[in-house]
Image: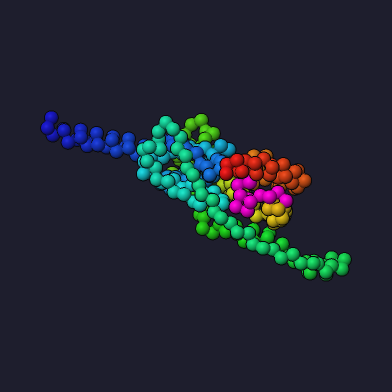
Amino acid sequence: MIKQLPITLLLLLTLQITAQEKRKFLYASVHDEVASVPNAHIINLNTKQGTFTNDNGEFRILAKPNDSLQISFVGYEMKTLKVETIHFGIEKHKIELKKIAIELDEVEVKKHNLIGSIAIDTKQTPKDIGLDKAKSALDFSMIDFSEKVILEIDEVDRSKPPSMIRTTDPTASFAGAGTGFSSGLDKYAQQKKRTRKTIKFKESFPKMLLSEFGKHFFFEELKIPKDKYLHFLEYCNPLGIEKLYKDGNVLKLIEILRKESVSYLKTIHEKE
């Protein structure tokens, strides 16, 4: 009996360590000083799993104490949260992001000396400076898209925990080699490509919109404060302004921006 006692203690210690490392869902929400922040990106730096907030700024992600969560969204300072035991309480934890002050470059408008000849006039017409700057701002060289970080489906909408095989299995990149499973790998590559394309559009959309409609339209005609520009677009986003822009439905897009600017200005003034 004495010889078996150390083995029993070792088994109990092993079970205790395993239980401590088991991850469970952490529920939280992301917001700024005015409202919730939808489509914010959350990644567990320890497991490399990621998700997005829903329309109410809510999300859930597998974590355990001492994990680190990175929360980011365009126009806001990136935040890193160290997970603690209190984050798994009954009440949903709130995470606040701070806005980044943006300064818009001035664009000089010059008269065009056009003579009616396409061959000559195209050489004299200046390039769209705002559009060129928007394209140059899309630098993704620091992101390694080979890592399986972003999940295609928001974890808040799942009815069961996500599959851990795709994101943690070190042999997942070799799936289909010499077998009949190559179609699954191709499907995942297509999903990753679509996700990357969606992120690039969301990053460039505010600058593309400003380049096309101009600063006068947003800051003088609609009277949107410059530091609220990105937040105003997120306020209008549930009405499908990104899709309208993609489809070239400019008149409908302008109509929504004009109408929503009235209620938006009233909302932020009430907050103040």
Q: Quadrant of the N terminus?
A: top left
Q: Quadrant of the C terminus?
A: top right
Residue 72 vs residue 99, the one in the foreground: 99
Q: For the image shown, how many numbered marks are present on the structure?
A: 0
Q: Residue at x 87, y 66 (%)?
A: 116
Q: Residue at x 68, y 53 (%)?
A: 219
Percent across and percent down for residue 94 are: 47, 39
Res 105 visible: yes
Q: Residue at x 72, y 45 (%)?
A: 258
Please state if 11 lies on the left or on the right of 261 as rendered. Answer: left
Please state if 72 lies on the left or on the right of 121 as rendered. Answer: left
The colour scheme applied to this rendered structure is: rainbow
Residue 134 falls in which quadrant of the image?
Answer: bottom right
Res 198 visible: no
| Residue 218 higher or lower than 268, as above or below | below
Residue 188 vs residue 46, the one in the foreground: 46
Decide whether residue 54 is among the magenta residues: no
Q: Main secondary structure of the magenta part?
A: helix
Percent across and percent down for residue 45 are: 43, 48
Q: Which residues fall within the magenta stretch?
A: 221-232
Please state if 61 lies on the left or on the right of 85 as rendered. Answer: right
| Residue 58 higher or lower than 104, as above or below | above
Decide whether residue 228 is among the magenta residues: yes
Q: Residue at x 67, y 63 (%)?
A: 106
Percent across and percent down for residue 228 are: 61, 49
Residue 189 vs residue 171, the one in the foreground: 189
Percent across and percent down for residue 83 are: 39, 42
